[in-house]
Image (cartoon, grey):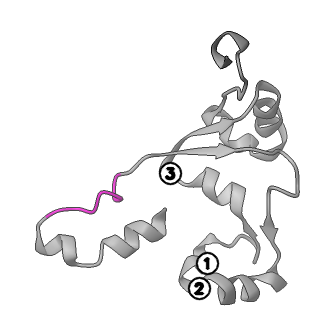
Amino acid sequence: MDNDVKFYNNGYFEQLHEESIFVNTKVIFTTHTPESAALRVYQPDEIWWLRNEIGEDLVPDEDLRDGRLDLTRRLADNPRVKIINAVSQEHAEVTKLIIIPEQAKKVVAVTNVLIRAYGR
């Protein structure tokens, strides 16, 4: 998200006396699986590989904590993220208690179900 702001705030909009649409964009972050396999944390010895794969500008030093990149926490901590959707009530509780307790106020539950009355 911040990369889009930086990319699109490159002087073009200044010439037009405007701001990029990304500057004040608010975001809903949906987390699908409260499992370690889905919540990737890149360790210090993997950062060089990640930067090589996607580009150094997409893995800035300010996103690292103790040399690690925790993607879930990085997204959750972004001030642009106003709501964090968890895909069930149980998932929301796990997310609040274990995954990102410091962002518990932002976590809401949405339920992915097919209601038979409407599904036919």
Examine the image and state in which quarter residue 62 appears.
Answer: bottom right
The residue shown at (87%, 58%) is: 37
Q: Amino acid at mark 3?
A: Pro
Residue 59: numbered disc: 1
Front of the two marks 3 and 1: 1
Q: Position of residue 56 (x, y in %)?
A: 59, 86
Q: Nearer the viewer, mark 1 or mark 2?
A: 2
Give the residue at the far top of this rendering. Answer: 117
Residue that numbered label 3 is attached to: 79
Secondary structure beneath label 1:
loop
Density class for disc 1 (Cα within 10 Å; few <14, some 14-19, many ≥20) is some
Quick one: quadrant of the C terminus? top right
The residue wearing badge 2 is: 55
- Which callout, 2 or 3, points to the residue nearer the camera? 2
Label 2 or label 3, whichever comes before in sequence order? 2
Which residue range is magenta in the image?
18-24
- Looking at the image, which is closer to me, 120 or 10? 120
| Residue count near mark 3 (Cα–Cα under 10 Å), binned few <14, some 14–19, many ≥20 | few
Q: Position of residue 5 (x, y in %)?
A: 39, 66
Relative to residue 117, is residue 67 depicted above or below?
below
Dots 1, 2 in contact, CB < 8 A: yes
Residue in the image at 88% along x and 55% along y: 36
Under mark 2, the amino acid is: Gly
Alpha carbons under labels 2 and 3: distance apart: 23 Å
Alpha carbon of mark 1 to alpha carbon of mark 2: how far? 7 Å
Question: Mainly helix, strand or loop, the magenta region?
Answer: loop
Left or right of 16 in this view: 64 = right
